[in-house]
Amino acid sequence: MNEQLILNVSPRPQTGRSASRRVRKANQIPAILYGKHSDPQTLAVDAPEFTRLLKAVAGRALIIELKGVGQDGHALGFLQEVQRDPITDRFLHVDFQEVKSDEKVEVNVAVLVVGECYGVKTEGGVLETAIHTVRVRCLPKDLPAVVEVDVTELRAGDSIKVANLKAIPGVEFRDAPGQPVVSCIEPEEEPAAATPAAGAAAPAAAAKK
């Protein structure tokens, strides 16, 4: 399995706004773990520990071992959604999606553009990212943290589509094969200088002194 993080969680038997406020007042974050094989489980997560975890995740698709939940005292999941207060930026709620080690999951994985684009460097093109995540299906052990897209050979006017992505063992791309991921836009042509029309009058001569 790729890099795996650990997060301690605790059951949260009480739900509702008042209960959530009490959890946040105790410097914890209300959370939920849901999956297709079990009922949703309400949890509480230590806010400082979750902050460290979020920094470690850094936008990557990583499996997280949740300790303190599940029949065996732990469960596997990944971050599905993090809600924050738009004014204070304080964490309001966290959603985890449970996964099974022997069962394939579908996950949106961030696109990471690598390399120096030929079309930008040599042809004056502009690099444009059409989508920032791609949908993949795989076992948790095969889940890539990011999907790298090498643009080194990309020329102006060309695109790298989902069908052109480098194969990853055990991973199936679920987006449409023709979906552009990264494109190199051709430079705009400079407008031609205006020329006087045939038969147009010549500029008036300078006045004699």
Image (cartoon, grey):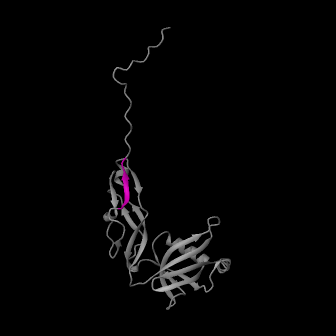
- Name the spot of residue 111 as percent of width and height, x first: 41, 65
The answer to whether any part of residue 206 appears in the image is yes
In the picture, the quarter occupied by the N terminus is: bottom left
Q: Main secondary structure of the magenta part?
A: strand
- Name the spot of residue 33 as percent of width and height, x first: 52, 81
In the image, 69: left or right of 168? right
40 within the magenta span: no
> Residue lying farthest bottom?
71
Depicted 167 relative to depicted 9: above or below: above
The answer to whether any part of residue 145 appears in the image is no
> Residue lying farthest top?
209
- Name the spot of residue 168 as percent of width and height, x first: 33, 72
In the image, 209: left or right of 17? left
Depicted 204 relative to depicted 61: above or below: above
182 within the magenta span: yes
In the image, 1: left or right of 41? left
Name the foreground residue: 118 vs 12. Answer: 12
Q: Which residue does the image show at 57% across and 79% down from the upper left?
A: 31
Please state the total of marks drawn on the protein image: 0
| Rendered image quadrant of residue 143 | bottom left
- Name the spot of residue 70 as percent of width and height, x first: 51, 88
Q: Which residue does the image show at 35% across and 74% down from the upper left?
A: 171
Depicted 100 relative to depicted 193: above or below: below
| Rendered image quadrant of residue 109 | bottom left
Stretch of the chain drawn in magenta: 179-186
Name the foreground residue: 135 vs 117. Answer: 135
Name the foreground residue: 105 vs 122. Answer: 105
| Rendered image quadrant of residue 147 | bottom left
